[in-house]
């Protein structure tokens, strides 16, 4: 492998950790990702730092926790001058969704000092900004379909495969690998797919591969969400603080169909990832390229009587796939708690560069070699009214430590809501169905975790500014 190597970073949007055959799901067809996993290190417990898009992606690109990088919610721009790991790597390309700034209402996401030579920004497949590179391509390559999407007679989600957003991302990545590189210089290519993000829809030939009745039903119990913070009952009725359909508004058939569409979207992306990996092989680049596959957060998909995403910290919302193929590294599965903030220092480390002073994660290269010495035993996720705004605001902090998951739903003075929370034993209750927050027999566990959380919050404060003297 060259020193430094090429880096191919493949990222989906809203893909749960369990939506891979390699993760033990026998119902989803992901042969290309399963093959990649068999050649890679598969991290079984990777947690993102926020369960919605922009704050999570900001943690990826900056290597910082949400409280440090400041992009606390969708619709917030990343602060000017925030250091992105891509800026430190040579000869980069970005394709698809970036999501480091506000881009609603037809506005274009403001570009940061990202270091990308090739920049194909397309926030999503829906009509919006005139700067959306996918819609520019669709208008040129398939003008009739572009017109139909604009007037609403066709859904962008169910366009034919040859015109689909996922195909466009793969085609752009293949073009970069084929003609867009600068000779033998090492490259960083980030290809961001939009699927399996809602709306729930896929090209017909993919949807037809799944029988909704044959898929497993949502994970829930009859008393949910009554045993959770009251917020969950609100979200079960209406998602996104009332801006989208909630679980209660789906019929059984509609929910089953949404789940089948989600599976179909995952398989569509898998096929496109396979095309990219095949091109990497055909160009003779595989032995010199680190390949990463991951996702920015998960999807509730009816589990716990919830849909989409929001202030939820169940594993299906905040635990994501992470596959790292490094030529010369033996395939493995690692159970350690790793986080998205670890990816920036990892990629720099693999490129022979030191972490930035602002990085708060740790390089995974030791784990890639099989050395877990001194690895941390916790993961942190911070929701700061990060999705659609609630009234009063919703602030939740999650700590995963050992066998436990703690989610503190903050009260005054952070918000006018009452303080409450969740506590799950992931050994005896891996589906997070039994909330032990108010269980007297687990009061000491809860107290100990809250104290651990205080220490973690101090440890993750941004103290990167250099100390110039004693006073």
Image (cartoon, helix red, strand yellow):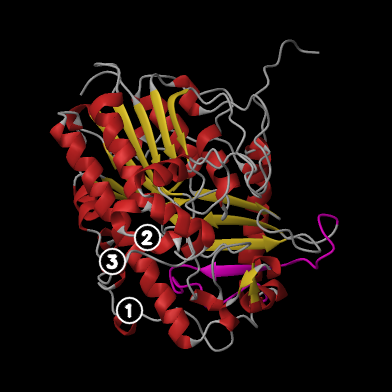
Residue with the mark numbered 3: 206
**Where residue 162 sits in the image (x, y, percent)?**
29, 52
- Residue beneath the point at 68% across and 59% down: 388
> In the drawing, what numbered circle is on residue 215?
1
Label 2 sits on residue: 159
Disc 1 secondary structure class? loop
Q: Is residue 27 magenta?
A: no
Q: Mark 3: give few (<14), some (14-19) or many (20+) Cα within 10 Å.
A: some
Question: Magenta part of the protein: which range?
Answer: 413-438
Judging from the image, what secondary structure is the residue with disc 2 in?
loop
Residue 326 vertical position relative to residue 32 in the rendered view, above or below: above
Q: Is residue 431 magenta?
A: yes
| Alpha carbons under labels 3 and 2: distance apart | 11 Å
Q: Nearer the viewer, residue 283 or 430?
A: 283
The chief SS type of the magenta part is loop
Assess disc 1: are there few (<14), some (14-19) or many (≥20) residues with their C-alpha within 10 Å of its C-alpha. Answer: some
Q: Nearer the viewer, mark 1 or mark 2?
A: 2
């Amino acid at each position: 492998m060259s020193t430094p190597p090429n880096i191919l970073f493949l990222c989906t949007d809203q893909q749960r950790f369990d939506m891979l055959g390699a993760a033990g799901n026998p119902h989803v067809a992901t042969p290309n990702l399963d093959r990649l996993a068999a050649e890679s290190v598969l991290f079984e417990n990777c947690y993102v730092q926020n369960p919605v898009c922009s704050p999570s992606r900001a943690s990826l690109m900056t290597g910082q926790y949400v409280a440090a990088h400041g992009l606390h919610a969708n619709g917030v721009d990343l602060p000017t001058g925030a250091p992105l790991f891509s800026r430190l790597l040579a000869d980069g390309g970005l394709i698809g969704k970036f999501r480091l700034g506000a881009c609603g209402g037809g506005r274009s996401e403001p570009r940061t000092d990202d270091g990308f030579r090739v920049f194909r920004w397309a926030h999503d497949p829906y009509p919006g900004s005139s700067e959306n590179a996918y819609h520019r391509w669709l208008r040129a390559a398939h003008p009739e379909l572009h017109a139909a999407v604009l007037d609403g007679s066709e859904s962008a989600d169910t366009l034919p495969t040859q015109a689909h957003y996922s195909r466009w991302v793969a085609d752009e990545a293949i073009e970069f690998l084929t003609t867009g590189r600068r000779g033998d210089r090492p490259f960083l290519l980030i290809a961001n797919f939009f699927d399996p993000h809602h709306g729930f829809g896929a090209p017909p030939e993919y949807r037809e591969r799944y029988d909704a009745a044959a898929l497993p039903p949502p994970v829930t119990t009859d008393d949910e969400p009554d045993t959770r913070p009251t917020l969950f009952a609100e979200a079960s009725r209406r998602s996104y603080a009332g801006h989208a359909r909630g679980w209660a508004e789906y019929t059984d058939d509609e929910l089953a169909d949404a789940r089948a569409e989600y599976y179909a979207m995952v398989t569509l992306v898998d096929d496109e990832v396979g095309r990219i990996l095949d091109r990497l092989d055909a160009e003779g680049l595989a032995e010199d390229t680190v390949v990463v596959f991951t996702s920015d957060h998960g999807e509730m998909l009816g589990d716990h009587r919830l849909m989409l995403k929001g202030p939820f910290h169940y594993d299906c919302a905040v635990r994501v796939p992470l596959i790292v193929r490094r030529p010369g590294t033996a395939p493995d599965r690692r159970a350690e708690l790793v986080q998205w903030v670890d990816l920036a220092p990892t990629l720099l480390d693999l490129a022979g560069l030191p972490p930035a002073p602002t990085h708060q994660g740790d390089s995974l290269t030791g784990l890639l070699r099989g050395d877990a010495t001194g690895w941390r035993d916790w993961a942190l996720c911070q929701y700061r009214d990060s999705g659609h705004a609630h009234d009063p605001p919703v602030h939740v902090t999650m700590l995963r430590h050992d066998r436990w998951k703690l989610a503190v739903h903050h009260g005054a003075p952070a918000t006018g809501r009452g303080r409450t929370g969740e506590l799950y034993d992931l050994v005896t209750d891996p589906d997070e169905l039994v909330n032990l927050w108010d269980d007297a027999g687990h009061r000491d566990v809860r107290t100990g975790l809250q104290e651990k959380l205080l220490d973690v919050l101090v440890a993750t404060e941004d103290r990167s500014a250099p100390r110039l003297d004693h006073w």
